[in-house]
Image (cartoon, helix red, strand yellow):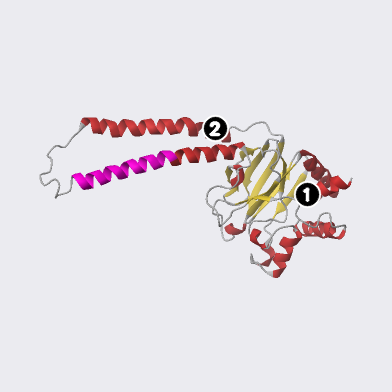
Amino acid sequence: MRLRTLLTSLFAALTGTAASAQDLEVIGAPDQAKMGFQTAATELMRDIVWLDSMLLVIITVISLFVMALLVICIVRFNQRANPEPATFTHHTPVEVAWTVIPIIILVFIGAFSLPVLFKQQEIPEPEVFVKATGYQWYWGYEYPDHEIEFDSYMVGSDYGNMLTPEVSEQLSELGYQDEHFTLATDTAVVVPTGKTVVIQVTGADVIHAWTIPAFGVKQDAVPGRLAELWFEVDEGMEGVYFGQCSELCGLSHAYMPITVKAVTQEEYDAWVAETQVAGEYVDPRGLRRLAAAE
């Protein structure tokens, strides 16, 4: 499978320059110079970002309140300011308050967080269905509705997971930069924007996890079990999104990335047709230029 993928890439490079550079913008990738979440590309991720922001406000208020109480206690009840300590052991109103108020806060948080969780876990009817199987240490993908199947390896896995000149050249041929090393794969999951995508996840050997941070999805891949996740990439958010196995799965766990390419429906249909005709994976990065040439 990996040899066929390499031959396909070489064929694309020899047949013209239309597919010689990455056509899609890299949107979902980590950035060492920034803080916070990656750019949200789905409604699920926007819900998570909003919930996180709301919780941050609540936690900040609680932290400032507790700090203020500590300062008051330090100032008013130290030995110099209060040489005669009080002898009471109970204060019913205070005890009721510190029991009831946290309950109210938790109920308030639950009222907003549970709908977000249910939206993630209630799997809708798929418009695109993909099966992802985790192996040590790569991912296998199937599109049962289109009879497409391929494996996805990290670019550079043939070179000891090191950024060598050969790996840098491979990244460049696939349209990536050196900074995408350990993130980019030789093949990618291709999905259309504006469509409900369901990923069925399982493991072939040990527990893995399929994760795309920009989509707000993460699902453990457990051997012998089938689990599902779903997402819908917003229209206008065509691009490349990176993720990684998020469950410690052995020696090369850090070198088991996930790449998803979100394209328009027309580009997706063209990719399916091209891949079916070729009988093997076809990189969709030149679809826009090919469509324009037609």
Residue stretch rendered in magenta on the structure? 57-76
Please say whether residue 68 is one of the residues in the magenta stretch.
Answer: yes
Specify whether 139 is left or right of 20: left
Residue 250's spot in the image, x, y percent? 56, 58
Residue 129's spot in the image, x, y percent? 70, 38
Please say whether residue 63 is one of the residues in the magenta stretch.
Answer: yes
Residue at point 33% right, 32% down? Answer: 101
Q: Nearer the viewer, mark 1 or mark 2?
A: 1
Specify whether 191 is left or right of 45: right
Q: Say which of 37 and 114 sits in front.
A: 37
Q: Amino acid at mark 2?
A: Phe
Residue at point 73% right, 61% down? Answer: 172
For disc 2, the marked residue is: 118
* Distance (Cα) linking label 1 and label 2: 33 Å
For disc 1, the marked residue is: 284
Q: Residues within 10 Å of mark 1 (few under 14, many from 20)?
A: many
Task: Tell me which label, 1 or 2, sits earlier in the chain.
Answer: 2
Residue at point 36% right, 40% down? Answer: 62
Considering the numbered disc 1 on the image, is that residue within a helix, a strand or a loop?
A: helix
Quadrant where the image shows the C terminus: top right
Residue 44 shows which numbered tag? Answer: none
Residue 107's spot in the image, x, y percent? 41, 30
Q: Is residue 78 visible?
A: yes
Considering the numbered disc 2 on the image, is that residue within a helix, a strand or a loop?
A: helix
Q: Say which of 93 and 77 sits in front.
A: 77
Residue 208's spot in the image, x, y percent? 58, 50
Q: Say which of 31 and 207 sits in front.
A: 31
Q: Is residue 280 visible?
A: no
Q: In the figure, residue 230 lies in which quadrant?
A: top right
| The furthest residue to the bottom | 165
